Amino acid sequence: MKKTTLLLLCLVLWLGPEAAWPADVGPTYAVVNCKVVPVSGPVLDNGTIVIRDGLIKAVGPTDKVIIPEDAEIIDGQGLTAYPGLLDAHSQVFLEPAREEPASLGRGAPAQPQPAAPQGFTPERQAFKLLKPTKAERAGLHRLGFATVLVVPSKGIFAGQSVLLNLNGDKTEAMVVRQPVALHINFTTERGVYPSSLMGTMAALRQSFLDAQDYARHQTAWQASPRRFKRPEFSPFLEALVPYVVGKRPVIFTCANQEDIKRAIGLAEEFKLNVLLSGANEAWRVVEAVKKARLPLLISLSFKPPLTSLYANQGDELKKKAEDEIYPANPAALYKAGLSFALTSYGLTKADDVLKNAQAAIKAGLPREEALKALTIHPARFLGVEALLGSLEAGKIANIILTSGEIFEEKTQVKKIFVDGQMFTVEKPPPAAAGPAAVSLNGAWQGKITSPMGEVDISLELDQQGSQVTGTATVMGNKRDLSEGTLNGNALAFTIQTEIMGQAMSFAFQGTADKDAIQGSMATPMGSAEVRLTRVPKD
Amino acid sequence: MKIRKILFLLAWLGLILAPALARGGDLLIKNGKILTVTRGVLDKGDVLIRNGIIQAVGTDLQAPPGVRTYDAWGKYVIPGIIDSHTHVALSGTNESADTDTAEVDMADVLNAEDLAIFTALSGGVTMVHTMHGSANPIGGQNVVLSLKWGRPSEEMIVPEAFRTLKFALGENPKRANLSDSEGLRYPQSRMGVNAIIRREMLRARTYMEQWARYLAQKQMKNPPKDLLPPRKDLRLDALADLLRGKLVARVHSYRADETLEFLGLAKEFGFKVACFEHIPEAFKITQELKEAGVGTSVFIDSWAYKIEAAEGIALSAAYCTRQGILVSLNSDGNERIRRLFNEAGKTLRYGRLTEEEALRLVTINPAIQLGVDKIVGSLEAGKHGDLAVFNEHPLSAYARCDLTVIEGEVYFDRAAYLQEREEAAKRAKAPKQTGGAR
């Protein structure tokens, strides 16, 4: 009886999944007569790629590849095939859940620091927060992205990321790997411990130590439950354990050169498996980065961080930093012999990914290296090199067909295959045709009213579709707006600034009409009311 | 025999290589009025710095080939000014969300790009003790920095300095100066401050006992099989280090009574207090401070800016100095830091200190308080080549710092800086088409 079952099982396995579950075979395509840039090997001037059931079945010169009879033929004449791009630090599909600042602990008795400080959520899963939209997916397809690492953004222990293939609407079907990494930001909590960067550093160390301790107790108890007292369960430490024992990677988001050194220090101190993300100041500490030998997920944002001299010595230097100095970060790393991924982290406009990659190339980064930094390098760093990152038989069929060299300004992505599914890329919607209900362009003036008092605020807004950029001036300090969006009448943006050496962000949420903006702003001192009116022209 | 020979050769090789490996610079300051602070005054003297270390202070010193010479004719040369208490070059000052935050370390949050470093250099300051703020009865661990503007933050840390832990008494930790909206927090009184410090010291003692018990068990011939180490607690680790004498206390205090209470706590738990900070009422308790061997780090003519500062007097620094207390003057921030020499000058007016006594307040005295007097604080052969050159006597109201040097490297040169600024202004004014814009 048992033997028969085994035999049957063997038969099923031998016949392969097609035989066992014949119903759900993906479509079969053959892209013929196109230029193929496999990344992992030499360029083919006239190549053919066969796609079947989500995978690349064959890739090679057109005259050598056998095309299956049932394949739909896609004429690739004049097109170039690249692996689908991979963004290794994306915040797409996450609801812009703007967390209210934690309570100020009014009247709370002083306590020894708890095992899980408030706001520490390593157990938070990006996967559970996903709200994919067709518009966002189409936007990414247009840029050539087939895969994104979605990273929760808020808090010190921001949570765990998920790697998604942009193949449709069903999040379960999109998952390539879950969870991927634990993400840590060198930020602070508001009003509760740790409320400062120094506190954050201490709390990170204590958390890692506690997780090591927890793992030690759990292991001892599991090995000899009759010798040890059962350790108390902690969801916080339980979530941390795989990361502190080096099983899974920890990704530190590094806003400036000091953050990079902090992350390297913690990696060494706790023997963590660490990747550095952000790090647009890596060029300033290139020797330390080289010595640390950590994988790099380098942001394509070229804004000098608030701590940087380049941000604090006048507009002229700041502009030069943005236009010339920081774009040379990838080139500097390349010249130092480092390989890295390039990511969209920190960019407010999605289209800036390719634009800024072009700027990095102009600043000295070879094109081939830029391509690797968006394909095979991130695939390797995230442990999915066997699945993604190049055009090779057996890998997932994530392929883009472009009208030309990918980093040329005029090049367009014509088609994109994700998990073997073909999407025809639509032309971008005409500018300002987003779902925005009003136009906000121009100058605005008003007040922020909080229990602490009233201050003047003025805005210069530049709105294109649902994207809002511009500047805010509060008490004489002019800051760029980030994360600005307008959906219908709902306006949201964030002002990043620095107070007493600490980076702080003020998130505004409210409504916008033709001549009035009102809403509330989350500040470290609590919520404040904001009202603005349009400054009439002339 | 052979081994000896090799050792001898190695020693020679070491002598040859040592200068090449040393990081500091070479500089000869010529013909200045040298105020050594500890070895008197040379009316027309030279200071020779090789590889960052002062090789000689004397007259008619010759510059070895290739060594830059700075002509200080008519100028005054003093040791680099040391600020015993400030908050510059940091990202953040307080971890104010708890009452004991001994686990936080200012060395974790250095910001080498803080413009205050440059401001400080322009006032002849070469070394600072940059500290946690005074929001909590027990603050954080502080760090001593050499102000090497433009160098990476880790190169600024002075490893020879004492490890120090900030404490704060009085109005700030009891939050008397904060509005209600900042939230009420225990402690709200001076008794609460004292009680919290005692509670934390007791916790640290228990923690030390727990670890001692564990380590003793571990070293037994047959250690128990179920032996696991106790939880490592960074906050209590820091306090345990204080109780073991590896950290010394630097205590923000204003009133005489709370200061004496704190000395009582230090005696009870056996930890070392290096210095009381600000302490406007120090002149009331000079005998007690002297007996305890604790110094002070103060302002001169700044008081009555809050209730607990009401009884400060300008004579305090001079009076305490004459009573044999180790006094330093501090900036507490990024403004006063550029004119600490003016502050020292005021003690000539308020209390009639000698010129040397006054200079000690911003040089060798803070060096002693920070445990770095073997390497800095005076112009002596063998110490770091940290110095400042002034156009006038540094205690004069007309004094201006012209040159600041750390380990033989020039970090501030007023003439060069002004020229650079002028050129930048010209460039900015120049018409764009001639390449004025960069």
Image (cartoon, rainbow, N blue to C red):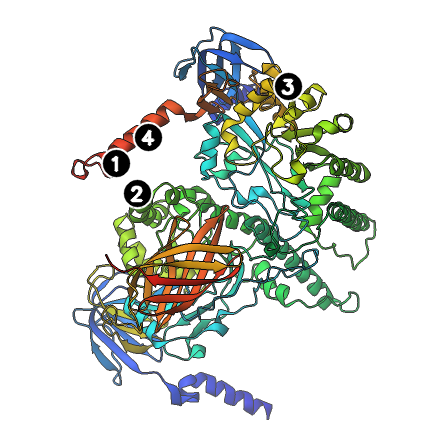
In front of the other: A509 or A153: A509
Q: Chain of mark 4?
A: B
Q: Is residue A317 above or below residue A107?
A: above
In front of the other: B20 or B295: B295
Is any part of residue A387 visible from this angle?
A: no
Dot in front, 3 or 4? 3
Look at label 4 and name its amino acid: Arg
Look at label 1 and name its amino acid: Ala
Q: Are marks 4 and 1 in contact (CB under 8 Å)?
A: no
Question: Looking at the rendered structure, which numbered label has been put on residue B421?
Answer: 4
Q: Is residue B397 above or below residue A288?
A: above
Q: Mark 4 and mark 2: span between their CA atoms?
A: 15 Å
Q: Mark 2 and mark 3: span between their CA atoms?
A: 49 Å
**Residue A447 point in image, percent of width and height:** 42, 58
**Between disc 1 and disc 3, whose residue precedes?**
3
Residue at the spot 52% in from the left edge and 48% down from the top edge: A262
For mark 4, give the secondary structure. helix
For mark 3, give the secondary structure. loop
Residue at the spot 54% in from the left edge and 46% down from the top edge: B92
Look at label 3 and name its amino acid: Gly
Mark 2 vs mark 1: same chain? no
Q: Which residue is mark 1?
A: B428
